[in-house]
Image (cartoon, rainbow, N blue to C red):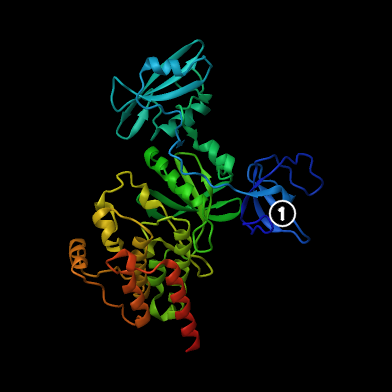
Amino acid sequence: MSGKHWPAGTQCVTKHDHTKPKAQELAFCKGDVVTIIEAVEGKGWYRARHNETGQEGLLAASALRERGAIRADPKLSLMPWFHGKISGVEAVQELQPPEDGLFLVRESVRHPGDYVLCVSFGKEVIHYRVVHEENTLSIDSQQYFSNLIDMIEHYMKEQGAICTKLVKPKPKTGMKSAEEELAKAGWLLNLQHLALGDRIGQGEFGDVLQGEYMGQKVAVKNIKCDVTAQAFLAETAAMTKVRHKNLVCLLGVILHNGLYIVMEFMSKGNLVNFLRTRGRALVPARQLLLFALDVAQGMDYLESKKLVHRDLAARNILISGENVAKVSDFGLARVNPKGADATLLPVKWTAPEALKHNKFSSKSDVWSYGILLWETFSFGRAPYPKLSLKEVTELLEQGYRMDPPEGCPPSVYTLMKSCWELEPSKRPSFKKLVEKLQKELKHLRDV
């Protein structure tokens, strides 16, 4: 996106300091993140809100740059201070020269499963055993924490049972702080500006809540567990690289109690529920085709960026207030730490080569897209009705394919079947699917 036009709600980064603003102008320093409220009459100025201070004012378009993409670097860590299995002696060496409040966390050698918080104070390093029991952590059996990130956050604010407040993390060699990298690229949001509301969904990794960020309605995914939150960084990094009208937009990230991923709010929920609650009487064939085209366009863009979704299904398509369908949760399937555990794959949506050989590609996404088309034209029915997962797997190998949903246009069913070619190379690309759906829509208009 060029600097010429930033739509309302876009987050931008300032390119230089502007500390002595004129009347009505916004004060900012280089690297601050601002949210565009509106373009101002006359060229090149915007009204914007400062993400840290919450102040509003005018600033020149020339002072703004787009937020940078985050590299999904394995060295990017939510816990750069976590050193894994090192001995007490090694921890002391790491915390030299002594500095009050310099700290790291290591795995306990003597008590497997526990951790040790090592803190520099005076001229010594003090070691606190962190006992891990029943999914909680504690140093003093008074304060309990659900994970290490929570514990460190707490002791950076309050001294509590330890010799000094934690001041400065000692990163493990080669590790980068996710917090610093996200802030530098302009994706770190301020917790104080987030108001959380009702739960609107539940994923296997945590709740999705409705919320408001600086006056804008948002959806917020909260991932609490250290390990999962760390894995989610890769998904978040993938989301910083993409921007398309048919992909759910990432607004930013808050690091607190794990990870809050803040996304645009899609008021009409997911495609399955949208279709089931309205049905044939309220959703005409043209609207079904428009949804199918939206999804194909979003996937064509992901394919052009060499990103594979891995979990394309109607439940992962969200509908905006204007009835635009957008793909969400791209990159999520990779979060599964076990990676190749086929028992966790959504069998009825997954291509045979991905089920059997863990081969995921844009072509396996195309197979899933065929299933999504079937879900769309059956108004949200579950695919392969009445068949068990085992039966589906066996029947597919014998060449079985689902019949068309009731009332489905023959041309759309032909498209579905082309997505279900056993040989991946015979399946159409998303670009081809977009072309065919556009033709189909034009045909519908001309009839």
- Expressed as whole percent of the image width and height from the top left, the position of residue 14 reads 67, 45
Vertically, is 75 above or below 14? above
Other-residue count near label 1 (Cα within 10 Å), few / some / many at <14 / 14–19 / ≥20: many
Q: Is residue 52 left or right of residue 447?
A: right
Vertically, is 404 above or below 180? below
Vertically, is 247 above or below 69? below
Q: Quadrant of residue 33?
A: top right
Q: Quadrant of residue 189?
A: top right
Nearer to me, 103 or 154: 103
**At 79% across and 40% down in the image, what residue appears?**
20
Which quadrant: the N terminus? bottom right
- Expressed as whole percent of the image width and height from the top left, the position of residue 265 reads 51, 58
Q: Is residue 348 left or right of residue 215?
A: left
Q: Amino acid at mark 1?
A: Arg
Residue under numbered circle 1: 47
Which residue is the extreme one toward the front? Answer: 425
Nearer to me, 212 or 359: 359
**At 31% across and 74% down in the image, what residue appears?**
417
Nearer to me, 2 or 427: 427
